[in-house]
Amino acid sequence: MTASEPRFEATLDPDALESLLARIDPDGVDFDGLRLEPAGGGEYDLVTPETTRRAVSPADLADAEPPVPAYLTNWRYWQDVGGEGTARRAFLRWCERAPRPEPETETETTPRDDREPLPVPERYAALEDGIDREWGQLRITPRLADDPETASGERVYDLTHRVDAGRDPADLEIQDEPRDARRIATEDGDGRYRPLKTAPTLVSGWAFVGLSGAELVETVDTFYPATIANWHRELRGDLDVDHWRETADRQTGMYADVADLPRETVEWMAEACCVDSQCLKRREWEYAPDDELEVEGGDGPFPCREPCSLVVAAARTWTDLEQEPERTYELELTPSEVRQLEALIDAVAEGRTDEIREADVADGANRYRARYLRAKRFDEDGLDVREVSTAETDGESGE
């Protein structure tokens, strides 16, 4: 079956259709390919991409052949969802690949949809089996929840971790309430607290099944706070961004010193913290409005509009560390040991230490290699290193 051959045949009973028609604006309806205008005498002019019918009675609308009922039930569903222009509505329409309004102010960072929108008949066909969308590490699947006898076009939403795509729901822990997301998001797979909710460390093995649209939005907001709202602001072209200087200058108390962090260090901080491997957000803030950082902001699906509290807290530590004067140290290492130190730092920075097996002794970050280096180069006071005096360094430079 192709997308243009929907199995679903939407229907509207006369009472529901009468209630629906009572909502028509005097100027008529123009929504998702459906145009419906009062024609006088209780009749309507109907236009869809597939058909044009003039002076149609409500009874004729109720008995119309597909795909007319699909357009009508689609309109009814979104009328019930309401909230035109809101982030909630825009997000739910994104979930099922419905067309969305053009941004009021289009910019280079205005998000583009990763897939083309679907017209109503094709969308209903896709909703029969469910339309899979990804939001960070979440997989969202809107689908039709219709009783075959009523076929009213109602949607429900399933939510899982994206790594659980294709798994039988019976093998997952079924959740009953949106607030259960808070418990799931608290710890990673190793039981460690997750201070950054957009870190790519969300545990898998759970499922929310048959959520309403409102429940879906609440659940996603619990997993990833404010991401829907900020995505929508960016979509409309009015995302308000607080850059590093603005954020640092308004810090007080124990964090006031972060305003003294050198610009170069802010570059290093963004490279360390604000990348795809550490956070699913896409950094939109820069050092200042007219001073962009060189490091890329990442490819996350939703924007980061200001340095988060975790970055500010880390900046306080780096501010203290960067105030220490640099010194010269002398340390004896073989060329292989220098490369091993590089491998150790890289493995820790990228979180790969758990991936290195005990038998991988050729890897510089191997645990036994690290223990061997410690046994060889450490003494009772730690690393066997000697600080070189200024006089010595001046003498070597010929001064």
Image (cartoon, rainbow, N blue to C red):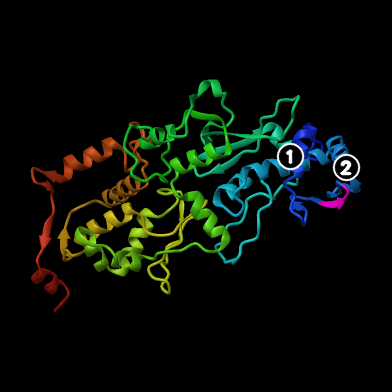
As drawn, the residue found furthest toward the bottom would be: 399
Q: In this view, does 35 lie above or below 213?
A: below
Q: In this view, does 103 lie to the left or right of 43?
A: left
Query: For mark 2, what is the residue?
Result: 57
As drawn, the residue found furthest toward the top would be: 170
Q: Where is residue 75 in the image (x, y as percent from the top left)?
A: 72, 44
Q: In this view, does 355 lie above or below 337?
A: above
Q: Mark 2 or 1 closer to N-term?
A: 1
Q: What residue is at 43 percent from the left and 43 percent from the top? A: 200
Query: For mark 1, what is the residue?
Result: 19
Q: Residue 266 carries which label?
A: none
Within 10 Å of disc 2 (Cα), the crowding (few <14, some 14-19, many 20+) is some
Secondary structure under the numbered disc 2 in the rendered image:
loop
Q: Where is residue 226 in the image (x, y as percent from the top left)?
A: 45, 50
Q: What residue is at 8 percent from the left and 42 percent from the top? A: 380
Look at label 1 and name its amino acid.
Ser
Per the rendered image, the range of residues in magenta is 37-41
Q: What residue is at 74 percent from the left and 25 percent from the top? A: 148
Look at label 2 and name its amino acid.
Ser
What predominant SS class does the magenta segment belong to? strand
Secondary structure under the numbered disc 1 in the rendered image:
helix
Q: Position of residue 70 (x, y in %)?
A: 78, 39
Q: In this view, does 397 lie above or below 30?
A: below
